[in-house]
Image: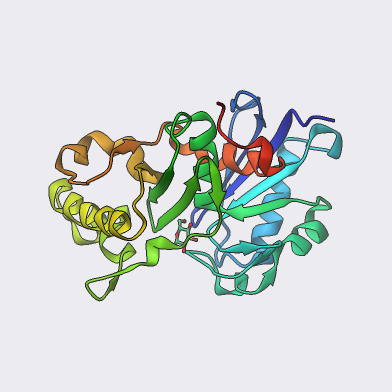
Amino acid sequence: MTIKRALGIDIGGTGVKGAPVNLRSGELTRERFRLLTPQPATPSAVAETVFELIRHFGWSEQDGPIGIGLPSVVKQGVTHTAGNIDSAWISCDAAALFKTVTGFQVALLNDADAAGLAEMRFGAGRDLAGLIAVVTLGTGIGTALFYNGQLIPNAELGHLIIRDKDAERRASLAARERHEWSWKKWAGHVSEYLGELRRLLWCDAFIIGGGASNKFDRFATYLECPAPVLPAQMANLAGIVGAALATLPPSQVKPRS
Ligand code: BGC
């Protein structure tokens, strides 16, 4: 049976957002719903919030599968890191927890990987081949790597050390706000960061997502990068759409040819 619809859920440091997604078109079939991330964002508290969101949509097994993106390295349903969520997510069997709390077997993946899947399938990356890095600039820096449309999961390149500092400390959107840097000054840090990714990985293009994507015009002119830099196209829906796509077998998530 071909899956046509899935519920995509995007867990962030401040909000838990979700919507049913048409997997063929990437469109939401109902309006996005957002709840505040509980504080502290412990696994069990967040799982309860996810359950509330599932109930909001009256979702059942017959409606389709559920995919969830979160700011963590995820392997076989276990979360190994915690970016802007409680450290109790480290070494947590999150898939088992979600099953216990919600009753659903969910597909789990890193939030930047989710955003990347959506951009590569329906957004800025749909016609791109070679090595593409989707870089989400927000509270942190998330990265998703694709080679000819195939995701290489859990790349944590936002934590590259540049001039003795974690790249997130200078090139995330939060760093710009924290330091009150101008767009031009901040774009210098982003250029340095992208330049380092290019030097090490020889990316063919970069797609800038996260909170920075809808501000792209403010800093794009200041960017200096040896590879094309494109704004993401899915705005704040990429995480939801990509989480829904994660419920498909990998062979069906590749960009359209
Ligand atoms: C985390 C990543 C996450 C990114 C964006 C980083 O701090 O390490 O796993 O994808 O933030 O949320």
Q: Quadrant of residue 23?
A: top right
Above or below, 109 relative to 74:
above
> Could you tell me which residue is drawn at 67 percent across and 35 percent down?
252
> Could you tell me which residue is drawn at 23 percent across and 34 percent down?
217
Q: Quadrant of residue 86?
A: bottom right
Residue nearest the viewer, comparing 36 with 27: 27
Residue nearest the viewer, comparing 137 with 11: 137
**Quadrant in the picture for the N terminus:** top right
Q: In which quarter of the image is residue 198?
A: bottom left
**Quadrant in the picture for the C terminus:** top right
How was this image coloured? rainbow
Classify residue 240 as left or right of residue 233. right
Above or below, 21 relative to 108:
above
> Could you tell me which residue is drawn at 28 percent across and 38 percent down?
228
Above or below, 253 relative to 108:
above
Percent x, y for residue 199? 28, 58
Percent x, y for residue 29? 65, 25
Above or below, 83 relative to 247:
below
Residue nearest the viewer, comparing 25 with 92: 25
Q: Is residue 99 visible?
A: yes
Percent x, y for residue 78? 68, 66
Residue nearest the viewer, comparing 72 with 76: 76
Q: Is residue 15 visible?
A: no
> Could you tell me which residue is drawn at 37 percent across and 51 percent down?
138
Percent x, y for residue 159? 38, 67
Q: How many labels does the image show?
A: 0
Classify residue 165 as left or right of residue 15. left
